[in-house]
Image: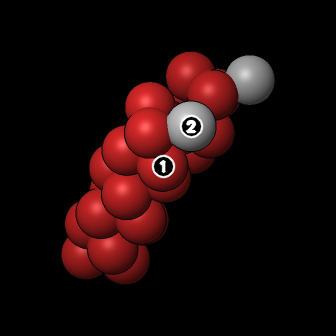
C-alpha cells in the first residue's frame, strides 16, 4: 500500500504543478492510461 500512497502524493504534486503549467497536464494523463 505504501507504494500506492507514494504515487498518489506524486500525482498530487504534479497536479499542483499542472495548475502552473496546464499544457503539461494532458501528457501526464496519457502516461497514466
Q: Which residue is mark 2?
A: 1
Residue 7 image-quadrant placement: top left
Tell me, yes or no, if residue 18 can be seen here. no
**C-beta proximity under 8 Å, tags 2 and 1:** yes
x then y, percent, for residue 13: 30, 63
Question: Tag 2, which secondary structure?
Answer: loop
Q: Relative to residue 31, is residue 11 depicted above or below?
A: below
Please report the residue visible at 56 percent of the width from the left and 22 percent of the height from the top. 31
Question: Observer-nearest residue: 10 or 27?
Answer: 10
Please report the residue visible at 41 percent of the width from the left and 65 percent of the height from the top. 12
Crowd around label 1: few <14 · some 14–19 · many ≥20 (10 Å): few
Q: Which residue is mark 1?
A: 5
Please report the residue visible at 37 percent of the width from the left and 57 percent of the height from the top. 9
What colour scheme was applied to this rendering of the protein?
A: secondary structure
Question: Tag 1, which secondary structure?
Answer: helix
Label ID, residue 14: none
x then y, percent, for residue 19: 37, 77
Where's the N terminus, which quadrant?
A: top right
Residue 32 image-quadrant placement: top right
Q: Give the number of the mark in front: 2 or 1.
A: 2
Crowd around label 2: few <14 · some 14–19 · many ≥20 (10 Å): few
Amino acid at each position: 500500500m505504501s507504494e500506492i500512497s507514494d504515487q498518489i502524493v506524486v500525482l498530487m504534486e504534479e497536479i499542483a504543478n499542472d495548475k502552473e503549467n496546464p499544457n503539461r497536464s494532458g501528457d501526464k494523463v496519457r502516461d497514466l492510461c
